[in-house]
Image (cartoon, coloured by chain):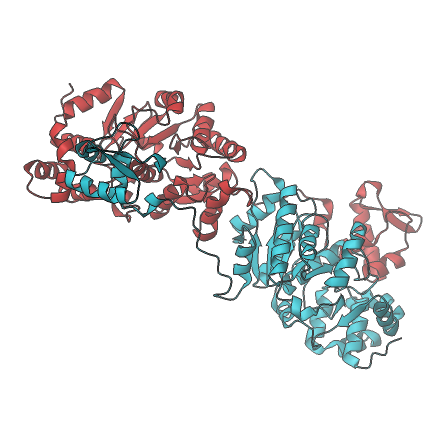
Chain colours: A cyan, B red
Amino acid sequence: MIPVDDPERRARLVLSSIGEPGDPRLLSLVAEIGPVAVLEALREQSAYGELRDSLAERLATCRPGDVLAGAARRGIRFVVPGDPEWPESLADLASVPLLHQRGGVPLGLWVRGPLRLDEVAGGVAVVGSRSATGYGGRVAGDLGAALADSGRAVISGAAFGIDQSAHRGALAVRGPTVAVLACGADRAYPLAHAQLLALIAEEGLVVSEAAPGCAPTRVRFLARNRLIAALARGTVVVEAAARSGALNTANWADSLGRSVMGVPGPVTSAASQGVHHLIRARNALLVTGPADVLEAVSSAGENTVDQFSGPTHPRDALSIEHRQVLDAVPVGRPATVQQVARAAGTSIRSATQALEVLRGAELVAEVGDRWRLTPARE
Amino acid sequence: MIPVDDPERRARLVLSSIGEPGDPRLLSLVAEIGPVAVLEALREQSAYGELRDSLAERLATCRPGDVLAGAARRGIRFVVPGDPEWPESLADLASVPLLHQRGGVPLGLWVRGPLRLDEVAGGVAVVGSRSATGYGGRVAGDLGAALADSGRAVISGAAFGIDQSAHRGALAVRGPTVAVLACGADRAYPLAHAQLLALIAEEGLVVSEAAPGCAPTRVRFLARNRLIAALARGTVVVEAAARSGALNTANWADSLGRSVMGVPGPVTSAASQGVHHLIRARNALLVTGPADVLEAVSSAGENTVDQFSGPTHPRDALSIEHRQVLDAVPVGRPATVQQVARAAGTSIRSATQALEVLRGAELVAEVGDRWRLTPARE
């Protein structure tokens, strides 16, 4: 058994073990009067009737030393506000409206893995549908790899589909990645991702607001999504059908003032429907790849995307009048200056000048006293 | 020969026959002093040195009566400002900046087909790459059909790819469609679309700023694009690679204050690159189908898209606390109220109340004094 000497840390540990993740009743009380006072009040059964009744059963059986020792055996540490690796950015959760009656700054986070929590907090959340298409999986994997390669942690939820591809992309380049779970950090959910989660715990970070051993319930997923959004500097939704949980994460990111980004897809794909809605109606930024994402989550001036430009052609440099003359020069039988001028709707003087310029650019050639396009021209 | 009695109409006819479409030198002069005075000045060689020189060759040989008679033989009429079917909306072209040194209100339009020009002017431009993908072609065809079916004319450029699919979609439902050409309205460009253009001329409208017989030059395409944008109430770009002419049309629509819309596609598709750029960087509206387009081009209140909603499930109506209790009820071996309360993190009283509500919704069933999920539940 590991001693928990600091009373505040001990109180957070107990409350984290007995409370529901993101329960605003508990978290707002803690924000107001501190964890020690809240725990005392719950123990003395002196106040907070409904909340106290809800937690009475769990409080009666909670052994904080055992919880911590059990966590430590599984390589899990409990990080609380004030710890060196606690990310300051999570404080933003104190002042945003509840979604689905969840919210608030977590009491602490259960963390497993070699990375520092505060160092991954500048990362990017890459989330999306469990039922991703091949297209979505490919884009998520490419994004995960490129973002991690640029040093940004790829934060996601370890679910099937987009989450898995994003984590894998990051792992493939040996880059930082963080799985934020709705169950305890010791559990593998989904079970099929036990190996993925083990690798993330070994090289990245597995994080949960729920104490070790906790099962993943639907409501805990809703609370979990707010942490993905809050830990990341921006959230990219790669694919999301109409009711995808990824849209909940995007809503959290939006409330938190973080970048909300969406990867478009075919309008005929149900898996992109939710993303298109985010871009259309919720003002999410359309992103087409890692450069766009990095630009959105970087400080002004960093990682600016190059101005959009396509391939260029010598004729792009020409004035409109020279282009008109160029268009008037035949491919086949050469034409006189007079013929070119009439076809171009320009004077003979202008046509003559233009033809000299075009010859200089090797776009036209003189044949006797007539002109034709150079063979390379088309 | 058809007499052209009205001096202004006659002057417009001559200037239209000798001038380049969208030549701002000519069109701004006409806007300033009127077509009759411009034509006189060009004839007297008294002014406008460079412009006069440019047009001298063509002016010397222009026979306006012959032009009009030739057009009439091909079923083409010349519509000028002030005519009943002249669309008022084209006046917007008077006050927008030049693009590629083209701009201005056309002197007149050469029109072929049974529809009235002013009646199609509330339509929607559907434009895009000549090298469209199967996806883009399908979306353009669906859009063309649905928009035309709703009574909006589908305006495009009769090019390969997106344009063709959009026109075809409209024709397939016997709806209104308009092809705006860079060459004379009597010519088929591309030649492979001769049959398509003949059908549009028969049931819709073929329109050109260039007089009959004119060849399609690159510069004329740039001038043509402004007419597509100006005739339509909004422009949808379905697919556009980096240098697609459709982006030029979108720029015109933007300058004209018309809706600019883009259909997203896979970020891995080069054919969608230009569209994504429009949405990302140029603030074009992402549209996913005809309902979105109709909403954008309709007056406030008309054609409003239904609020986005996915399928619903009975549990969506539950409070968070009831959902927590539902999640705590096992699928297999039934649990006592105490067990459910502890798993849900709620009081026994609350759990009991919640279970009654859930039983009412047929989500859980009582087995003796224990509870389990109903078989239909998952």
- Residue A285: where, in percent of width, then height? 52, 54
Residue, far front? A368
Residue A154 sits in which quadrant? bottom right
Q: Is residue A119 left or right of residue B326?
A: left
**Which of the image's four quarters has the C terminus of chain B?**
top right
Residue at image x 74%, y 70%?
A108
Residue A372 sits in which quadrant? top left
- Residue A305: where, in percent of width, then height? 48, 57
- Residue B81: where, in percent of width, then height? 22, 35
User: Is residue B133 shown above or below A64?
Assistant: above
Does residue A63 appear anywhere in the picture? yes
**Which of the image's four quarters has the N terminus of chain B?**
top left
Residue, far right? B368
Toward the viewer: A105 or B2?
B2
Residue at image x 23%, y 20%?
B72
Residue A47 sits in which quadrant? bottom right
- Residue B86: where, in percent of width, then height? 26, 33
Does residue A48 appear anywhere in the picture? no
Q: Is residue A177 left or right of residue A20?
A: left
Q: Is residue B136 left or right of residue B361?
A: left
User: Is residue B113 shown above or below B257?
Assistant: above
Residue at image x 47%, y 28%?
B169
User: Is residue A183 shown above or below B42?
Assistant: below
